[in-house]
Image (cartoon, rainbow, N blue to C red):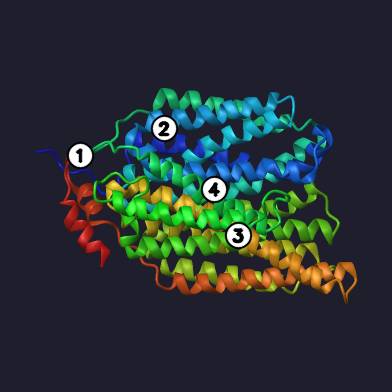
């Protein structure tokens, strides 16, 4: 009988698969933030107003929120190679269409196609890590995945600022396109594999309900936060979204009896998954708020241009990326608690410190605070992702990843909406008694104070997070054959607790 492979060993083939997926995910997430600083240029060159051009960002976010819930089904139904080709094929096609777009309408369609590919990539990456990487090494590999989540959004605005300084806006897409096509062709030649287990049936009613459910909530939140203007306003989309979301949840609970839900909500039966999801949502609310508030402060009150702003925020993103693999190794050694408690404490302290900013605060102090907050985020994301997904049995990998990615989108929209609304309403009220600059500063301070409160809630959640890998994974990693494993029911009963 052949000897069992070491629990910590990662095969060369599995390492290659994860590397290909990480590179592809970096490209698609880089694209997600590359557009933001280009909106004023696009308004002038495409002859559209601010409320219209904002749809390039809003439509991308809406498409993500609608497509991601379907990825749990897609990842179970299709092979890794097929899903990868679908994701990168859509993204590459959308990028080419955007580069050649003759007007705003085609550019908007291109962003929707890009977002469809982007939405599939992150759940695919996380599910593949859970499937291919032994529990003992997941922290380290998730640290590498965190580079994608942290560095790509930070590099995006800086890269687009440099491109716009010297070239047409089309080069934002022409720069990304060859990398995307290369990743598509390389993955097509290297990836393979078949889905395991039964192939679920697609429930069309769930798909129909998911569109107004997640799309309505995210769009309503974006309207509340002032990301868009015109249209029906926030109330109607939020009400429609809430009703559709309730119907969607009830439909999934009913379908769980037949084993074919679009999103299997039984992932929430695992306490650590639930705590980690809540912690990531609170963290994303704080992060997205900072991502939008800090550039506004630097540009509106400090007078920095988009390129200088991007360069100022770049070191923080690089700190997150450089530290992520090391944090993953620490996680494998000490578990999540010391890392997440330290991380959330740093994030909270910096957010409260931001609430004391003034129009003449040194940009070097802002840079230092941003780097410290980035350090806190690096200590938070990798341990939380890993601790949340580790307890899930294999059949819930794709659903757990899809739920997590969906709720991150909703939390990001909610954080942006809440903090921008607080900033705008406070500044408007203060404008009656204060000069414009002081009123605007009062708005920023109030928003950062709310973000700091959210950070304090994250500290409380972090105190309850533990790493409790699935017994199914432990057994499978130490067994000699691919079909080895304890009965799913035994592992699930133990982990639910």
Give the CA separation, mark 1 to mark 2.
22 Å
- Name the residue that disc number 1 marks: 482
Q: How many marks?
A: 4
Q: Is residue 33 above or below residue 265?
A: above
Mark 1 and mark 2 in contact? Answer it, CB < 8 Å.
no
- Name the residue that disc number 3 marks: 287
Which residue is painted at 39% across and 58% down in the image?
A: 388
Q: Nearer the viewer, mark 1 or mark 3?
A: 3
Which residue is painted at 88% across and 67% down in the image?
A: 436
In-front residue for pair 68/495: 68
- Name the residue that disc number 4 marks: 215
Label 4 or label 2, whichever comes before in sequence order: 2
Disc 3 is placed on an element classified as helix
In-front residue for pair 390/100: 100
Label 3 or label 2, whichever comes before in sequence order: 2
The picture places residue 400, in percent across and down from the top left corner, at: 37, 51
**Left of 202 or right of it: where is 366?**
right
Outermost bottom residue: 433
- Name the residue that disc number 2 marks: 83
Q: Nearer the viewer, mark 1 or mark 2?
A: 2
Give the CA separation, mark 1 to mark 3.
40 Å
In-front residue for pair 415/128: 415
């Amino acid at each position: 009988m052949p000897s069992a492979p070491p629990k910590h060993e990662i095969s060369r083939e599995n390492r290659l698969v994860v590397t290909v997926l990480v590179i592809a995910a970096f490209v698609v997430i880089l694209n997600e933030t590359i557009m933001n600083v280009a909106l004023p240029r696009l308004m002038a060159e495409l002859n559209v107003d601010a409320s219209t051009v904002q749809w390039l960002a809003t439509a991308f976010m809406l498409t993500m929120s609608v497509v991601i819930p379907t990825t749990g089904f897609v990842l179970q139904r299709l092979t890794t190679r097929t899903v990868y080709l679908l994701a990168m094929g859509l993204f590459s096609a959308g990028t080419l269409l955007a580069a050649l777009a003759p007007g705003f309408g085609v550019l908007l369609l291109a962003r929707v196609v890009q977002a469809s590919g982007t939405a599939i990539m992150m759940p695919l990456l996380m599910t593949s890590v859970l499937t291919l990487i032994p529990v003992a090494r997941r922290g380290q590999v998730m640290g590498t995945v965190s580079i994608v989540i942290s560095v790509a959004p930070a590099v995006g605005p800086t890269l687009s600022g440099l491109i716009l300084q010297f070239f047409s806006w089309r080069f934002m897409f022409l720069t990304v396109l060859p990398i995307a096509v290369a990743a598509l062709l390389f993955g097509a030649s290297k990836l393979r594999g078949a889905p395991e287990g039964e192939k679920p049936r697609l429930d069309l009613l769930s798909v129909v309900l998911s569109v107004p459910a997640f799309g309505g909530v995210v769009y309503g939140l974006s309207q509340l936060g002032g990301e868009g203007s015109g249209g029906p306003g926030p109330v109607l989309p939020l009400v429609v979204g809430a009703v559709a979301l309730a119907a969607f949840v009830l439909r999934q609970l009913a379908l769980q009896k037949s084993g074919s839900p679009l999103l299997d909500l039984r992932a929430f039966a695992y306490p650590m998954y639930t705590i980690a999801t809540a912690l990531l949502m609170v963290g994303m609310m704080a992060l997205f708020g900072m991502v939008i508030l800090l550039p506004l402060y630097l540009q509106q009150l400090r007078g920095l241009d988009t390129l200088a702003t991007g360069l100022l925020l770049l070191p923080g993103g690089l700190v997150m990326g450089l530290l992520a693999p090391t944090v993953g190794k620490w996680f494998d050694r000490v578990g999540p608690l010391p890392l997440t408690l330290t991380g959330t404490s740093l994030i909270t302290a910096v957010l409260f410190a931001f609430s004391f900013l003034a129009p003449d605060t040194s940009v070097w102090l802002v840079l230092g605070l941003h780097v410290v907050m980035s350090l806190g985020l690096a200590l938070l994301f990798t341990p939380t992702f890993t601790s949340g997904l580790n307890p899930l049995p294999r059949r819930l990998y794709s659903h757990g990843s899809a739920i997590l990615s969906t709720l991150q989108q909703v939390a990001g929209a909610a954080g942006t909406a809440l903090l921008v609304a607080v900033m705008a309403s406070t500044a408007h009220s203060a404008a009656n008694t204060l000069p414009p600059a002081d009123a605007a500063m009062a708005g920023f301070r109030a928003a950062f104070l709310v973000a700091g409160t959210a950070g304090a809630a994250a500290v409380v959640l972090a105190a309850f997070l533990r790493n409790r890998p699935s017994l199914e994974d432990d057994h499978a990693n130490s067994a000699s054959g691919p079909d080895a494993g304890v009965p799913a029911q035994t592992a699930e009963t133990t982990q639910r607790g």
